[in-house]
Amino acid sequence: MPLDFQDHLRQFCFDTTVLLALLQTRYLQPRYHIPKHGNLHTLAWAYAENSWSQKHFVDMLRVTPRVFNFLLTLIENHPVFFNNSNTPQTPVEQQLAVTLYRLGHYGNAASLRSIARTAGVAEGSKEVEKCWIDERLGFRGTWREGWVMYDGTIVPLFRKPGLNGDAYFTRKSNYGLNLQV
């Protein structure tokens, strides 16, 4: 049955009302401001404050704010976080955040330089790291002189791995693993 002029007019009015509502609403769900500036600590704490943005906290640190606080209470009084230096250590919560952030990343994003830049902290000294390893392991091998790689150096693979092979493709157009010692 063909529509008459009144049916067309009603449909036109309905369509116009729907389009006008869409234009005025723009977003069907409420919008929240998500902070995007600052360093790792500023963003993590901002994300932890609101329940709707805690998923961003988890994306950054791989734990919920509740788990983060629990871990913090377990480690904050450990002697390793205290020193007798004139230069105070970075607060324990920031050290934990940096550690969790680094553990949650891989590849070039987990390099010491990249993490330090993201977190707004110093990279530290590789010589200090070597001394720390020497003290803990009691090992002074040829790696100390630098022929063995450590800290994110790419070790090329013979061929593409069979399982999730594309994940091992490097920026140098080969397949490899980042070595972390």
Image (cartoon, rainbow, N blue to C red):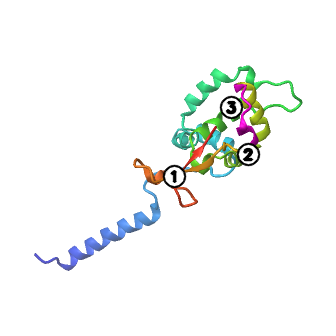
The residue nearer to you, when weighing 68 against 146, is: 146
Residue designated by label 2:
120
The residue nearer to you, when weighing 153 against 77, is: 153
Q: Position of residue 98 (x, y in %)?
A: 66, 38
Task: Using the numbered discs, state the Cα–Cα distance from disc 1 to disc 3 in whole angstroms.
Answer: 30 Å
Please give the label number shown on residue 97.
none
In the image, residue 155 above or below residue 81: below
The mark that comes first in sequence, 2 or 3, is 3
Task: Inspect the image, locate mark 1, and give the three-letter code of the amino acid beneath it.
Answer: Arg
Stretch in magenta: 137-146
Please give the label number shown on residue 31.
1
The residue nearer to you, when weighing 47 against 110, is: 110
The mark that comes first in sequence, 1 or 3, is 1
Q: Position of residue 133 (x, y in %)?
A: 72, 31
Task: Using the numbered discs, state the Cα–Cα distance from disc 2 to disc 1 in whole angstroms.
Answer: 29 Å
SS of the residue under disc 1: loop
Say if residue 141 shows up in the picture.
yes
